[in-house]
Structures are given as structure tokens and as C-alpha cells.
């Protein structure tokens, strides 16, 4: 089968890092570019992390586009306690290794980068959005056809029944930019959603990495995940972590049979001033909004095996 063309939209923290490694080395995917959005960390950290990870797996051919440095209307909030000061836990990807060739950042901003691909390949491109939806909302605001011009948009975001990871009812990506999330939901931009209900179906432990080849890149991944696990141990009382973004990538495009339950709902995102409510998704019952397919349950054992196999391929890829 011909590799599926995709763009990843990321706010590269630890779980984005794992998803990016998998996407860059999956033979089923044609990674046409990575767009950066502020979220887990500030935009300059996101851009540097993204470019360095691509270099580490020999994918300097993948363009990196810089997007929104802040949400549509709110002040940026970041998560150093979750992802570390620069987004990659106990390691900092500063690119000091002179053997790494530099990835060239495209001068085209993220929304226009989407638009250029839509113009050249209408209806073919898939965007997998693993952070706040700011870049996608900006693109729609400036007239880029994000609804019918793409094959689909898949988003890791929100929660339905599961307790939130930012507020009681709010998930991080939705809470960072609720206005962007609501505009994308209202406009039918997002076709499939992987909320916490699905992505927290799998707990990933440090011992799981014993199945991954012992390479320098595997050591970097291990140090990043050690930080993530320490955060989850303190925050959630679990001896492991949730890898939301690679679960979304695998469950949506690489092994969709591992999604065992879905629902179709029209959703809205709270955009009010109450910070305990803003970013909460709720069912829209007033009509006028398209439905999205929402994954609500995964095969945890199958997903873990698939994720580890994909990660093993990535850390042993030529160029690592």
C-alpha cells in the first residue's frame, strides 16, 4: 500500500517525542511535515525538540514549520512539572552533537503550511494534532479549507467520562486553548478524537522499555520517560505514565483495530472565564454542529505490544 501522507501538529513534550519517533519511522506513513504549537513548553523549545528528534532518526528531510506561540486569546500556560523545563524530562535536546546535520526550518508558518498542502493535494492529507488546536483554528480563520480540503484531522484532546488531567473535567490540550478547540469542533475540522477515556487505558512502565534495543536514542527516551513517570507517581499515584500521543497515532492510523469502542457525538468546549470549567468538553444538543468519531476504549495489551514494537524500530533506525 502507498504510505499515507500526514502532517503532525505537536507541542513536543515527552509523549509527543515518542509519537514523533514512531511517525518518522513507520513505513505506512509519509511524514510530509511537522508543525509546532506552544503548549507543553514554549514554542522555541517545541521547535528545537522536534528538529533534534527528526535528526536523531535521520529524517532531516522532514520540514519543520513554526506555528502559534500562544493561544488565540489566553495567556500561554506550560507544563514544566509534567515534561521538564524544556519538554524532554531529564534530558535536554540542545543539539550540541556536531555530527547531527541541521534540520532546515521552513519559512512557511504552520497555517500556511497546511494551506499549501491542501492546495497541492486536496482531500489527501491527514493532520494528527497532538497539542492545542491553535494552528488549526488560525488556519480556518484565514480561510484555509480545513473541513473538506483534508482527508481528516485526528486530535488527541479532551475527556468525556474520565477525570481530567488539568481540571476535574478538563484535559491539557483543550484547557490550553479552549477557544481553538471549540472553533474546530464547531466548524467540523476535527473528524476523530482520542480523549483521555481512550489514551489512559494503557499505563506504560519503565520496565516496559526493557523490550527496546539498548541504543543511545533508547537511553534518551528512557531518561525522558523516567521524568514522566515520576510526575505521574506524584500526581496520579501510579507507577507508570500515560503515553497519550503515541496511543492516538497508533490507534488512529497504524493499528485501528486496537480501538475497541467508539461513539459519535457533536461536542463543544467550554470557553468561559471560570478556569475550572474552561477546556471541558460537553455534548452539543442544539444542532448545527457535525459529529466526530470519539475513541473511548482500547485494547491495552495489544496497544502496549504495538507501541513497544514501533518504538524499538525507531530507536534502532539508521541514523540513531
Image (cartoon, grey):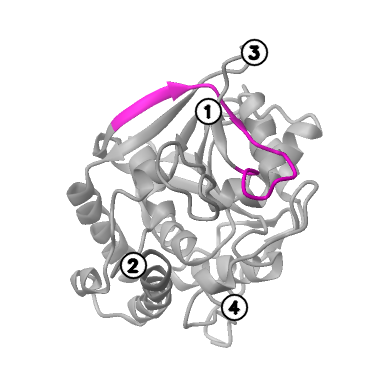
Q: In the rendered structure, are the residues bearing label 3 and label 2 in contact, judged by CB atoms less than 8 Å apart? A: no
Q: CA distance from mark 4 to mark 3?
A: 42 Å
On the question of residue 97 being in view, the answer is yes
Q: Quadrant of residue 146?
A: top right
What's the magenta region? 261-279
The residue lying at 74 percent from left, 31 percent from top is 144
Q: Quadrant of residue 289?
A: top right
Taking 21 as reference, is 97 above or below it?
Answer: below
Is-magenta flag for residue 217?
no
Q: Nearer the viewer, mark 2 or mark 4?
A: 2
Label 3 vs 1, first from the N-terminus: 1
Question: Of 218 and 288, which appears nearest the observer?
Answer: 288
Question: Of 310 and 300, which appears nearest the observer?
Answer: 300
Question: Of 181 and 57, which appears nearest the observer?
Answer: 181
Q: CA distance from mark 4 to mark 1?
A: 36 Å
Question: Of 160 and 89, which appears nearest the observer?
Answer: 160
Label 4 vs 1, first from the N-terminus: 4
Q: Secondary structure at mark 4?
A: loop
Taking 144 as reference, is 64 above or below it?
Answer: below
Q: Quadrant of residue 279?
A: top right
Quadrant where the N terminus lies?
A: top left
Label 2 vs 1, first from the N-terminus: 1
Label 4 vs 3, first from the N-terminus: 4
- Find disc 2 in the rendering and name its residue: 237
- Find disc 4 in the rendering and name its residue: 85
Q: Secondary structure at mark 3?
A: loop
- Find disc 1 in the rendering and name its residue: 151
Residue 288, label in figure: 3
Amino acid at each position: 500500500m502507498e504510505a499515507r501522507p500526514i502532517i503532525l501538529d505537536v507541542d513536543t513534550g515527552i509523549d509527543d517525542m515518542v509519537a514523533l519517533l514512531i511517525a518518522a519511522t513507520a513505513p505506512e506513513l509519509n511524514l510530509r511535515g511537522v508543525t509546532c504549537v506552544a503548549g507543553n513548553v514554549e514554542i522555541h523549545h517545541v521547535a528545537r525538540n522536534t528538529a533534534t528528534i527528526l535528526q536523531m532518526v535521520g529524517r532531516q528531510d522532514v520540514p519543520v514549520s513554526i506555528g502559534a506561540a500562544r493561544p488565540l486569546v489566553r495567556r500561554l500556560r506550560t507544563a514544566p512539572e509534567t515534561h521538564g523545563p524544556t519538554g524532554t524530562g531529564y534530558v535536554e535536546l540542545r543539539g550540541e552533537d556536531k555530527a547531527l546535520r541541521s534540520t532546515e526550518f521552513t519559512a512557511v508558518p504552520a497555517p500556511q503550511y497546511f494551506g499549501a498542502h491542501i492546495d497541492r493535494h486536496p482531500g489527501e492529507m491527514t493532520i494528527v494534532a497532538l497539542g492545542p488546536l491553535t494552528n488549526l483554528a488560525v488556519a480556518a480563520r484565514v480561510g484555509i479549507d480545513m473541513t473538506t480540503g483534508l482527508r481528516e484531522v485526528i486530535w488527541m484532546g479532551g475527556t468525556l467520562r474520565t477525570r481530567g488531567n488539568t481540571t476535574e473535567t478538563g484535559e491539557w490540550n483543550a484547557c490550553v486553548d479552549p477557544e481553538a478547540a471549540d472553533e474546530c469542533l464547531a466548524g467540523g475540522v476535527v473528524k476523530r478524537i482520542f480523549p483521555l477515556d481512550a489514551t489512559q487505558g494503557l499505563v506504560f512502565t519503565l520496565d516496559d522499555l526493557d523490550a527496546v534495543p539498548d541504543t543511545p536514542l533508547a537511553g534518551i527516551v528512557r531518561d525522558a520517560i523516567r521524568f514522566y513517570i515520576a510526575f505521574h507517581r506524584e500526581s496520579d499515584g501510579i507507577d507508570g505514565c500515560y503515553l497519550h500521543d503515541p496511543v492516538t497515532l497508533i490507534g488512529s492510523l497504524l493499528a485501528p483495530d486496537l480501538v475497541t469502542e467508539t461513539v459519535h457525538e457533536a461536542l463543544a468546549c467550554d470557553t468561559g472565564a471560570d478556569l475550572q470549567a474552561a477546556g471541558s468538553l460537553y455534548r452539543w444538543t442544539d444542532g448545527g454542529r457535525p459529529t466526530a468519531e470519539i475513541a473511548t476504549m482500547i485494547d491495552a495489551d495489544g496497544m502496549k505490544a504495538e507501541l513497544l514494537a514501533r518504538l524499538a524500530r525507531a530507536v534502532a533506525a539508521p541514523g540513531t
